[in-house]
Image (spheres, helix red, strand yellow):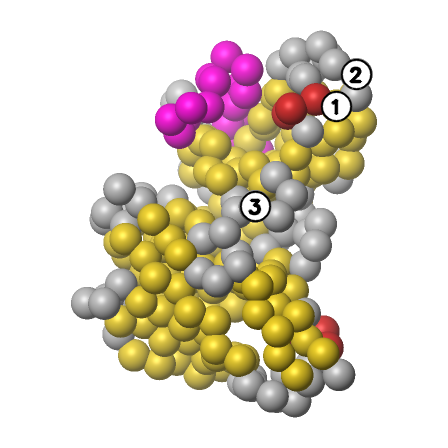
């Protein structure tokens, strides 16, 4: 079946540094990908919609200058957390719709900012 | 606005049946997903309902009533491995998902 991968699976960084997370659709093309964030014991929160060939669409309250999204190709979207702070520590998950009824999720990236 | 409600936590016994309810208010509603999520992992797909009625898939069944903004996930013959969080998510017409907070299901022997 279709698979979405994320890299890295886990990252620990110092406050003030930037972290890039990659999301790849491995055997299908995705013109749209979604980035979610999940804090412990909370729901998945949609951060932004990544669009191949155009600017990402950010949800209300998400800083576009802090969370940079680049959908470079039909199989790759990247999320860069710039100048990360401890409050950015979270579980980041991407997903890609395969068809109208099916959306595949990446395995997630656990970010810890010290 | 967008709002999805489901119970925070439920407890059931191994071998029994449990029903997890989900109510939603979502503009541009275009279907209701159920996902299972184990701690520290991404959600995995369980079911998708777009039409009213019950859909059965092995031990899991899912029901949708669009007029009532209501869905439930029914798990039969519970196994210990079913201990997880179960999330309902409403799909908008542009593929975006609006998530409930998840129901933590605890299975006891």
In front: mark 3 or mark 2? 3
Q: What stretch is highlighted in magenta?
A: A57-76
Question: Where is the N terminus of chain B found, in terms of image quarters?
Answer: top left
Check whether the beta carbons of the residues at disc 1 and disc 3 lie within 8 A of each other: no
- Which of the two labelled residues, at mark 3 and mark 2, occupies the earlier sequence position? 2
Same chain, marks 1 and 2? yes
The answer to which image quadrant residue B83 occupies is bottom right
Residue A25 located left or right of residue B106:
left
Q: Which mark is residue A42?
A: 3
Residue that numbered label 1 is attached to: A113
Q: Which mark is residue A47?
A: none
Of helix, strand and loop, which one carries label 1? strand
Q: Which residue is drawn at 43% across and 33% down?
A: A49
Residue that numbered label 2 is attached to: A14
Question: Where is the C terminus of chain B found, in terms of image quarters?
Answer: bottom right
The answer to whether residue A102 is seen in the rendering is: no
Name the chain letter of the residue that bears numbered label 2.
A
Check whether the beta carbons of the residues at disc 3 and disc 2 lie within 8 A of each other: no
The answer to which image quadrant residue B36 occupies is bottom right
Find residue A47 and report its horizontal and vertical position in percent.
48, 32
């Amino acid at each position: 079946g279709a698979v979405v991968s994320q890299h890295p699976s886990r990252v620990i960084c110092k406050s003030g540094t930037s972290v890039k997370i990659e999301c790849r659709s491995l055997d299908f093309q995705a013109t749209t990908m979604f980035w979610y964030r999940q804090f412990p014991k909370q729901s998945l929160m949609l951060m932004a919609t990544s669009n191949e060939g155009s600017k990402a669409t950010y949800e209300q309250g998400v800083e576009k200058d802090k969370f940079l999204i680049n959908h470079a190709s039909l199989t790759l979207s990247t999320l860069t957390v710039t100048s990360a702070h401890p409050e950015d520590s979270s579980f980041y998950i991407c997903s890609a719709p395969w068809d109208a009824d099916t959306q595949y999720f990446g395995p997630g990236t656990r970010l810890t900012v010290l | 606005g967008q709002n999805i409600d489901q119970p925070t936590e439920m407890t059931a016994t191994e071998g029994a049946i449990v029903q997890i309810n989900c109510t939603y208010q979502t503009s541009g509603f275009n279907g209701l997903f159920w996902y299972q999520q184990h701690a520290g992992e991404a959600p995995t797909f369980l079911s998708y309902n777009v039409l009213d009625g019950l859909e059965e898939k092995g031990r899991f069944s899912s029901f949708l009533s669009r007029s009532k903004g209501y869905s439930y996930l029914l798990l039969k013959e519970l196994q210990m491995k079913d201990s997880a969080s179960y999330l309902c998510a409403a799909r908008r017409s542009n593929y975006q998902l609006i998530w409930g907070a998840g129901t933590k299901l605890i299975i006891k022997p």
